[in-house]
Amino acid sequence: MRINDLDQHHQRHLNNGITNNHRNNCFRNLQIYFFFAFKSDQRQTLKNDSTFLSFSLFCSVKCFSFLLFCLGSIYSYVVLDFCIWKQKKTKTNNTNLSFSSPLPLSFFDTFQMEKFEVDACKNWIETNNFHTIALQVPDEDLDKIQDLIDSLQKAVSFENIEFFLVGDGCSPCCNDLLNAQYCQAQGLIHFGHSCLALSNHDNQQTIPIFYVFYQQSLP
Amino acid sequence: MFSISNLYRKSFKNDRELTSLFHCSSEDAVQYLSTVNERSSLVFYDPCYQNAIENYSKTVASSHLIFSKINTENLTDESTFSLYGRSVQLPIPLDPSNYSIIFISSSNASLNNFALYFHAYDFQ
């Protein structure tokens, strides 16, 4: 071995020694940190039990990493979902009413769609075998009519089903039977608050009505 | 008739002044219903409280509270009092001296509509 090689060998050995000493010091500090977490009578037992301390450190790091991963996933999902919801809302406002949305329902949309009770509407439509339905929604929910029709079309097993939007002929709480009959609708689904005015008096020609009241809870 | 301070009283100006309607929030309604123990009360409500009232009536067993049912059909049964799309089964004939009327509304407009129907019924 030449002198230069010998120097390099010593230098490498010296570096390894410093690195190992440094690692040992760091690990000893961590040992002290975990060491004081135990009672005095247990300290002596755990003093030389480096396996237990290493395992504790390993579990802590893994749990922290998993927690960070979960938080990151939730944050990404919420941000992405909000972007989809925002894009759909912008598109709806720009195109007025377009009944074929390529974007899926976001979490925010799904949360807002629960009040429409789509399953109950679907059961009512299929039970009565209706193929032409008039929908009446309050003004504040007109921006959700696209998602509502999409949901109903997906839910109902019929293929040739038509939906008409009515409600501009009367106040929102009353049934717009006149426009529903102009559409030759077989049934009317009324969403939101209703005055529950009778629809079968004075020999007026009428159609079946299904009410979705937007249920609220008592405190 | 009632001395509930936190309820906004809306009275009919009929001759006898026996009939009163109460406009109250849902919080006040629940609190008030728990205190009724004297006269029989017909409890009408906005349809948005249908599920909540049905659950409440199952948990609270009071002979003084008679809860209405949402019903939009005309009923010919005389023991059933139908008003404004709501029906109640009457244990004794409808008389203002026997019943108080409670309407749990979600808005002032809803109460006014109910009052109009109620007044048109000429409940005196």
Image: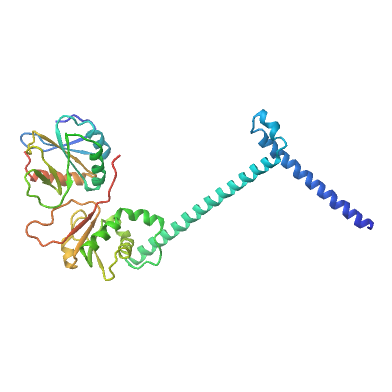
Q: Is residue B25 visible?
A: no
The foreground one among A171 and A154 is: A154
Q: Residue at 32% across / 59% down in the picture? A: A144
The picture places residue B67, in percent across and down from the top left corner, at: 18, 41
The picture places residue A45, in percent across and down from the top left corner, at: 69, 33
The picture places residue A26, in percent across and down from the top left corner, at: 73, 42
Q: Is residue A200 left or right of residue A44?
A: left
Q: Is residue A204 visible?
A: yes
Applied colour scheme: rainbow
The picture places residue A41, in percent across and down from the top left corner, at: 67, 28
Q: Residue at 51% across / 54% down in the picture? A: A73
Q: Report the quarter where the N terminus of chain B lies.
A: top left
Looking at this view, name the residue that lies furthest to the right.
Answer: A2
Q: Residue at 29% across / 55% down in the picture? A: A117
Q: Is residue B72 left or right of residue A153?
A: left
Q: Report the quarter where the C terminus of chain B lies.
A: top left
Up-down relation of residue A4 to residue A61 (above or below): below
The foreground one among A4 and B4 is: A4
Q: Is residue A41 left or right of residue B87?
A: right
- Residue B99, image quadrant: top left
